[in-house]
Amino acid sequence: DTGVSQDPRHKITKRGQNVTFRCDPISEHNRLYWYRQTLGQGPEFLTYFQNEAQLEKSRLLSDRFSAERPKGSFSTLEIQRTEQGDSAMYLCASSPTTGATNEKLFFGSGTQLSVL
Amino acid sequence: AQKITQTQPGMFVQEKEAVTLDCTYDTSDQSYGLFWYKQPSSGEMIFLIYQGSYDEQNATEGRYSLNFQKARKSANLVISASQLGDSAMYFCAMRRTGGYQKVTFGTGTKLQVIP
């Protein structure tokens, strides 16, 4: 069990560029979540996958954002035409499908995005 | 809708002392779970403790305990014998019961342990 890994740890980009982040969940976890965290705030839910199916998307996820989990393993989050307001920490989390209320999330270390 | 409120943006505690971090929540659900996560400066969110809405006893995990008062809708985290490594952001969170339910987080409390 190597934990949830995210790549890259930091990304600096210019406004208008596209960026893509990767998340590798814990191998036996079939639930995967993306959260966004801005300075001084708690994580805000963006989207959720069960295996390869994207089952929920937040209204925070504008048309410029797209997430995939093609084989039910790793996931990518792409932001097109980045804006300065996209600057944030993007957190990925995974969990096993126990269906229990105490099913906790295992988080990666996040990708810190800075849009100049 | 669920809402988590953490009213303490920052707290200081002397090393070896106990500290209580406040959390109140709002939900119309009868069955739900409450979590506390720790986020050190490295960024990773670390699970600390869980309390179910129907659990009769307050949860404890080592130096962490959760003071659950259901009628008041509060779920305060108590850290006993604070250590320098406890300095971090602490987030209260909740989830409804039933299949998949996303976790909703509060805004966090920054705890600093003073030597």
Image (cartoon, coloured by chain):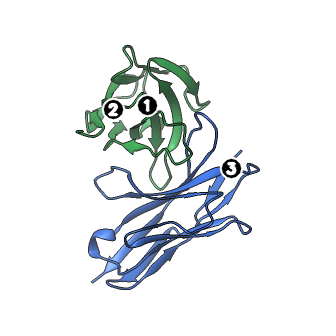
Chain colours: A green, B blue
**In which quadrant is the N terminus of chain A drawn?**
top left
Check the image and name the residue furthest to the front.
Answer: B56
Residue A34 lies in what quarter of the image? top left
Q: How many marks?
A: 3
Q: Nearer the viewer, residue B52 or B25?
A: B52
- Name the side, left or right, on which B93 lies relative to A105: right
Amino acid type of the residue that numbered disc 2 sits on in the rendered structure: Pro
Label of residue A25 in the image? 2
Amino acid type of the residue that numbered disc 1 sits on in the rendered structure: Leu
Within-10-Å neighbours for mark 2: few <14, some 14–19, many 20+: many
Q: Pointer 1: what residue?
A: A32
The answer for how far apart the CA atoms under marks 3 and 2 are is: 28 Å
Q: Pointer 3: what residue?
A: B31
Which residue occupies 33% across, 29% down? A14
Which of pointers 3 and 2 indicates the residue nearer the eye? 3
Pointers 3 and 1 within a single chain: no
Q: Position of residue A64 (x, y in %)?
A: 50, 21
Image vertical order of residue B98 relative to residue A47, above or below: below
Q: Nearer the viewer, residue B106 or B56?
A: B56
Which residue occupies 55% across, 19% down? A63
Q: Position of residue B10 (x, y in %)?
A: 47, 71
Under circle 2, the secondary element is: loop
Residue B81 lies in what quarter of the image? bottom left
Under circle 1, the secondary element is: strand
Chain bearing tag 3 is B
Amino acid type of the residue that numbered disc 3 sits on in the rendered structure: Ser
Label of residue A100 in the image? none
- Name the side, left or right, on which B2 lies relative to A32: right
